Image: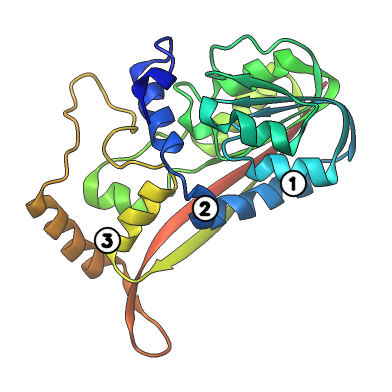
Amino acid sequence: MKNSTIPDTFSSRKQTIARHFATASDYDQHAKIQQQVCHHLLNNITHTQQKSVLEIGAGTGQMTRLLAANIQSQHWFINELCNEQSTTLQSILPTANIMIGDAETIDLQGKHSLIISANAVQWFDDPLSFVTQSAQRLQAKGQLVFNTFTSDNFLQIKQLTGQGLHYPAISEWQSALETIGFENIKLSTQRFDVAFANPYAVLKHMKLTGVSTNQTQEQSSSSQPFIWTKARLKQFEQDYWQHFSELNKEGQPYVNLTYDVLIVSAFKA
């Protein structure tokens, strides 16, 4: 992929994120947990008949396909960071207004009866701001449905490398929703422990689903970029086996990677 397809107006961090997802061509094949999350979000939508739906961070269209098959709406607005997904998203919902850009800065005009976002808010520079932005974009009595992740997400990677995204605490999400005036707030968590044959397979899985352990994490200005070396990779493998391995029924060792998902539903007063 050519860098010129990524707008210069994106922050350097968002350019990196866009580049990773634009090159994750086998995302849907490997993003099985993300697909399950989409089904959980769909089950949290109260009304199947909507006036206007806004989806934030549609990606390859996992959530978009479920919405198209299960929700009726007079108007559709689909936002995505990567322009490479435009054609795919338009094919899923031919009448939708596809809005490519950074959801934190793009002008997403209009008022919507449903705002939904699957597996995207964790990439925001300021994830909690999504609550305020959504309140401004929702109609009265409109519903907000989204997921993010807890601090236990990818706990194995964070413990062994010190790298990872910063996830606001559940109490912070609750407070943000209450402060802005949302009602009927529901927060729930789902934990998925995914088995892999070895630690290298874990890293490959993360790469194939657009996740980097060394470039998209939140870093302080004084922190040094995390760079994989042969020695660091060998140590990572040894430590992963030591701390996070189990035996299956046949007595064969495997390792886990933890996804810890926070699902949120709330209504504008």
CB under 8 Å between discs 3 and 1: no
Q: Quadrant of the N terminus?
A: top left
Check disc 2 and report the residue beneath it: 31
Q: Within 10 angstroms of label 1, few (less than 14), some, or many (20 or more) residues?
A: some
* First in sequence: mark 2 vs mark 3: 2
Residue that numbered label 1 is attached to: 66
Q: Which residue is the site of mark 3?
A: 200
Q: Which is more toward the observer, 92 or 131?
A: 92
Residue depicted at 39% across the width and 36% down the height: 20
Task: Look at the numbered disc 1 and give the secondary structure of its residue.
Answer: helix
Residue at (42% x, 15% y) in the render: 10
> Residue 154: percent from the left, percent from the top?
39, 50
Q: Which of the pair 121/35 is nearer the observer?
A: 35
Type of residue at label 3?
Tyr
Q: Label 1 sits on what residue type?
A: Leu
Packing grade of label 2 (10 A; few <14, some 14-19, many >=20) is some
Please indicate, yes or no, whether residue 25 appears anywhere in the rendered image: yes
Of callouts 3 and 1, which one flags the residue occurring earlier in the amino acid sequence? 1
Helix, strand or loop at mark 3: helix
Q: Amino acid at mark 2?
A: Ala
Compared with 257, 269 (above or below) is above
Label 3: how many residues lie within 10 Å, few (<14), some (14-19) or many (20+)?
some
Looking at the image, residue 34 sits to the left or right of residue 152; the answer is right
